Structures are given as structure tokens and as C-alpha cells.
Image (cartoon, coloured by chain):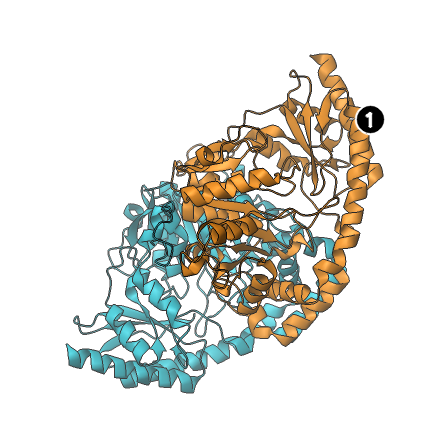
Chain colours: A cyan, B orange
Amino acid sequence: MTAAADRPSNAPVRPPFAGWLGTTNDVTKTFLAAGRIPGLINMAGGLPAPETYPAEALAAIARRVIAEHPQDSLGYGPIEGLPELRDALAARLGGPDFRLGRDNILVTTSGMQGLDLLGKVLVDEGALIAAQAPTYLGALDAWRPRRPRYRALRVDQPDFDAVAGLTGARFGYAVPNFSNPTGRLVPMPVRRRLVEAALATGTWLVEDNPYGGLQFDGAALPRLIDIAAREAAVVAPGAAPSAAPSSAYDGPVIYMGTLSKEIAPGLRIGWMVAAPEMIAALTMAKQGSDLCTSGVTQRIALAAIEDGLVERLQPDLTALYRARRDALCAALAEHLGAWFTFEVPVGGMFVWVVARDPRIDTDRLLNAALDAGVCIAPSSVFDASGDDRSAFRINFTLNPPERLEEGVRRLAGAVRRLTDAS
Amino acid sequence: MTAAADRPSNAPVRPPFAGWLGTTNDVTKTFLAAGRIPGLINMAGGLPAPETYPAEALAAIARRVIAEHPQDSLGYGPIEGLPELRDALAARLGGPDFRLGRDNILVTTSGMQGLDLLGKVLVDEGALIAAQAPTYLGALDAWRPRRPRYRALRVDQPDFDAVAGLTGARFGYAVPNFSNPTGRLVPMPVRRRLVEAALATGTWLVEDNPYGGLQFDGAALPRLIDIAAREAAVVAPGAAPSAAPSSAYDGPVIYMGTLSKEIAPGLRIGWMVAAPEMIAALTMAKQGSDLCTSGVTQRIALAAIEDGLVERLQPDLTALYRARRDALCAALAEHLGAWFTFEVPVGGMFVWVVARDPRIDTDRLLNAALDAGVCIAPSSVFDASGDDRSAFRINFTLNPPERLEEGVRRLAGAVRRLTDAS
């Protein structure tokens, strides 16, 4: 970034911005500007369908919790989150093989804040992050100010070596359920390998699970944190009090979740589950980030969880998104099948669309797509090096079926113009 | 921080935490632990009186805004904040000599987030911050992960040289109104010197103003941003379009405010006013920090501002706090006057109490005070070097007069034991 061009020429030079601001890529800027194009069909973001927000229920809850809990809602709260919400999350997020206590839980102001806090407590400049590749764009954004190095965890490759992947890293990062951006499930043997590698190397293993509640087909796989708790119990039976199921969780997996996909992103409520020493470090970082999460939104989240709102919404939400996934995949097969391949995801919000033709550059496709009135997320933004231009991520949750189909039709027009021109 | 002591001895070593986590001082930990002492009189924090929170009004507003604006409240919003809130803040925060546009405004998730974002966009490791000394503890916390160096701006000293103070710094930081921790007003000549130095050197000048609305006696002084706009117009009349009052603000002052002290901290709504190039950089940092501030709390804040809630609350709030300040100062004079001096602040939340006796160590006093059932904030936490142990900050807004007096009586007991023992 440079100083504004319209300052007087005799004005003194302003101090430089921090170095990382020079490392953001142009695609991100294109992306942000795209929001202003009228009539654009946005298939780039990870936005829920706004008609699913339970506005009436949340309006009533908000009035009630502020009136009944004015001090919790309106005052400064504990940095870690309101005790009642931490307890409710601990009860909800534990597993058959492990118990969670309040000290295992940090409430965050959105899942994104959790990623920011991770960078703050684990990354010094040049430290290594081992990230499932391609990698969630927002995680790369969150860690950029810490200036890390990256190692790609290519969990889809048959020879994936998890121990080599995690060794020497400050932490490993994975989105095992309907991975952002690929929409894939990390299969059970790879989950086990990741957890065993974390236990063997001591490396923290971050399990980011915003989409776990959005599974359309089949049964849920065990979470990494479930596997870690089980392995710890099997590997070291009674080796230490902390390994026994009756004591608080102390494993290497740091689990992250959010209400953004299952209730509403506007609450900005997320959570982290981790060993108490990690929660204590994250709390130090949160103190200097926003002191505490809003008591209003924490109390709304607690009441929504206690009222069973997530469970009541889930059937309609998954039915709606399943139908939209099917509509998008049908349109992709019909209009883009000649140039691209994709797998039908069993959950989440995205389809990952890979070019068959190596001449297709998806950064260039984004510009052509914007000209055609549709926005997609090119693979370069999910690559720490920014080099991968062979695929794109496309969202199916925001738009109704006919608009998804129109978006894909516009995209096909853009691809045609791009490949005709080259 | 070190690994938890109760992990099995054969467990692999976990990766190190980021270096800055080793730099937090013990006083901060004592502080955090103090919250759990039963019966403690907390005079350390900067907490508003909870009985002043307009719970009924905010409960009704919350219900209304979620029902009437479900998409704004519950969806993802623009990173910079809701356009209507940015416009309302621009209209509210401009001055007679300058106009603010939407591009001058960033909504933040609390004032603390604003400080975090400043560190992210302006501080590389080892970069220099010029901070009014003593310095707000929360600002030191927010910037710690960036590992800056500090230069003390001793604005109270008659020979204070603002140009030398700001030269070579990434930014200057000041709390001109009822400075945290000292409660003092930066006098008008010093304000002018700071602004002139910022204009002459090009250094950004951060004006943190959470307490501006809490003035008990006398008239408000012009803000640094008002002075900067006026100076720019005088120094360079028509030199550039950006210097004329009719165009958007482009000066070196970055102004910060919050609703935490005048309505309720639980909303976690703050704002930054700055030149558009700075707002753009801060927006990049906010994207990776929490994506956007909660739409629920933004919509509540907007409705509260539009309904005139701040103005309706202010007379009662200042009357209440004025009475509490008077009660605290009377108690300090009566019970601690032999050992300490202080000035009566004309606003804010704090009195800064300075030891007459150089043998008094206020870090040691904190421990003695906790034993006596009262908590104060020692000067070491407001000193970037952690060395100053000659004073403490004491709050008068949280507790009613009789409790303030009891707290000071306990504190006097602690001082007596400490000085008798030495």
C-alpha cells in the first residue's frame, strides 16, 4: 500500500505500513470490489441463505436475555466467555471418551477470531504452519500479519506422510469436514494418521469444523478430537491422570466451531476447545484483541443452544442446501463438464471445480466471470504461495436453484470467451 | 509460559509459544486472579456502574432491530461496518472545520480491537511507538504481540518536545481526555504542539477518547482531530483539495471512540476515524481479525444513537460519577493523604495516586491490598518497561460512595502494614 495520491506534494512522508500489508494478493482486492457490481451473482463467498436466519426467534430471545441478564449482557464479562456459555459448550462438545471442563473452552468473537488468536500465540515471524492444502482463505488472511512459512499437508495423496507433515511445525491445520475450499471429507484412515502424528510429534493439531452440522448424505465421521481422546486412552492407559477419561481434556487437538453456519453469522460467536494450557495462552491473546466477546451475543447464543434452536433448524437447513447442491452440480455437469471436473460434496457449502485443460487460468477466469456478472473464488487465494490457478471454489448455499443455474450459465460464457481467445 | 506440569513425562515436547507471551508481567496475572477473591472491593478496573446500563431500552431496541433488519443483524456485513452506522458516526464525529465521509469510518468490535488493528497495520517487530506516559495498560497488551519499542511522551513536563517525540515513530498515542491512567486533561497548548508535530513529521497521531463524554466540571477542550483539521486549513489554504473543509478528512490524527463508557461495554462497539488510506489498511487487518462486527450489536448501536440514548443518559451518568469522584477523593485525602498525593480529575473514571515516600513500592502495595480485600492498579502496568512502582490508579465509577470509602480504608491498612514492616 502506498500513501494516498491526492495529498499535497509538500506533505511530509507518512510512516510505512507493516510489511505484511504488501503481501496481500490482487485477487483479494478484486474480490472485495466485486461486492459493488449491481446484478452480480455471488458464488464466491461462504454465505448462508439469509431466509434461514431465525429472526423472529432471535428477536424474542434478544429482548428476553437483555431484560433478564442485564449485567451479563451489557457489562464487561470474563475474557474467556460467560461461565454458563462455557459450561454449555463443554457439555455439548465432549465425546464418549472424554470429558470437557470449563477450562477447556474459550468463547471467541467468530471463528475468524479463533484463527487470529492461534496465530498470535503460536507464530513468531518465519515459524512453520503445516496446513491442509488447498487452505481456507480466511486462515491465510488471519495469519498473514504473523508472517509464517507454510508446509502443504496434501491429505488427498495416497502417500501422505502425516508425521513428516507435522514435524517441526508450530501447528497443523485441517478442515476435516467438507473442507474449505474443496468440500471433501478427510477419510477415516487419514484422520487417524493425523492424530497419531500429532500425538507422536507433540505438534498442536487444529481441527476447524464450521461445516460439521451441514452433512447431507451418510453418517458423520468421528472428529479428530474424538480420535485423539480415544488414542490417548488406548496408547497410555493410566499413564497419567490427564489421560484418563474422567479428567479434563489435555490432548494436542485444538477444536474450533461457530454458530455462523447453523444459526446466523451476525452473532459472531465461535469457540475453541483445547488443553487448559492452550486456553490460557489464547486468553492472554484475546485480552489484547477485544477484551471479551459481547455479552449480548453470548447470552443470545446460550439461550439459542438451551432452546434447542440448532437442532430445530437443522432438518430444514440441510434439506434446503442439499437441493441447492444438487441444482448446482447438475448445472456444472451440463454447462461446464467439457472443461472441468468436480466431485459432489456430501456436505458443507462448496464445490471444488478443477480444470481439465491446463491452459485454463482461474485468476483470469475470475475477471472474465466478473464481466459476465458472476463471482467465483479462484484456487490461488487458497494457496499460501498464490501460485495455483487450476481450480475454483463455487458456493451453493446463498442462491436459489434458478439463480445457481443462471450463474453457471454466465460462467460457461466466460469460459468460452476465455478459451476462444487463447 | 511452559508446558503443563501434569502431562505424562514421556509425552513429546509441545512447540514453543510465540515469544511475546513470555513478556507479560506477573502483576497482570495477579490482577486476573484477583477477580476470584470473595468480598474483594475492585477499584482496579475501568468498569462503569452496572446500574446505569439502560437494560429496558436496549432490550426493546434489540427485539425491534432484529425483527426489522434481519439481514443486517444476522448476516455477514461489510468488513468496515454497516453503511448506515458509518454514516451516522460520520455525521456525529465531524467538526466545524471538517466533514467526515463514510470512507473515514471503521466500526470496530470494541475500542480494544481498534488498538489491535493499529498494531497490525503499523508495527513490524522492533518498530517504534511514541506513547503518552504513563500508558493505558490495554494498549500495551494490544501491541505486545507485535513486539514494538516504546518512546515515552511525557506530555506533563514543561519542556515536552513533541517533534522530537514523534520523529521516527510509526505513530504517537495519546489519551487527551482524562487520560488513562492519570485522569488528567492534556492542556490546550500541548494538544496544539502534538498536532503540529504530527503535521510536520508526517507521523500518525492516535487520539484515544473513550472518556470524552464523562466530563464533570468545565467545558470540553477541542479534540486533536478538530485541531488538526483547523491547522491543515490554516497552514495550507487551498493547497490541495483534501485540505479544504468541503472534502473528506485526510489528516494525520486517527481518532478512536466507543459506546462502552456512555451506554454499555457489553455491546463491544467502537469506531475509528482516519484518512481513507488508513481506514483501507485497517480494514485489511479487520478482515483477518473477525471478518466483521456483529450486525446485532451494530444495529442496536445505530438505533441507540438515533434514539438519542447517549444524550438522555449523560446527565444522570455524569452526576452519579461526579458524586463518586468526590467521595473517593475525600476518602483518599482523609485516609491516605499522609503517604500519597493526587489531583482531583475533572472527568473520566480514575484518580492517579502518587507516593510521597520513595520507599513505597506499589507492586508490593497491590499484594498487601489484596490481602486487605481491595484491588488497585499499580503504575508498573502502565509503564512499557514495567519499572515504575511509584503510583497507582484507582477507579471511582464502579462502586457506590460507602464502598469506595471502605476500599480506601482497607487500602490505608495495607499501606500502614507495608510501611511499618519496611
Q: Secondary structure at mark 1?
A: helix
Give the labeled residue for mark 1. Answer: B334
- Which x, y percent locates residue B257? 59, 52
Q: Where residue A225 sits in the image (x, y, percent)?
A: 47, 53
Looking at the picture, tell me which residue is in the foreground, A319 or A337. Answer: A337
**Is B389 placed left or right of B6 in the picture?**
right
Query: Residue B156 at what x, y percent from top left?
Result: 59, 31
Question: x, y (%) of residue B207?
Answer: 55, 46
Report the side of A380 relative to B245 (left or right).
left
Compared with B231, A280 (above or below) is: above
- Which chain is home to disc 1? B
Q: Quadrant of residue A204?
A: top left
* Vertical position of residue B381 compared to residue A58: above or below: above
Q: Nearer the viewer, residue B93 or A267?
A: B93
Amino acid type, label 1: Glu
Name the residue at 65% across, 26% down: B391
Q: Quadrant of the C terminus of chain B?
A: top right
Is there any visible trace of residue B292 in the rendered image? yes
Q: Is residue A106 left or right of residue B35?
A: left
Q: Residue furthest right?
A: B402
| Label 1 environment density (alpha carbons within 10 Å; few <14, some 14–19, many ≥20) | some
**Quarter of image, res B263:** bottom right
Q: Determine whether A353 is above or below B109 in the image.
A: below
User: Between residues A374 and B163, which one lies in front from this camera angle?
Assistant: B163
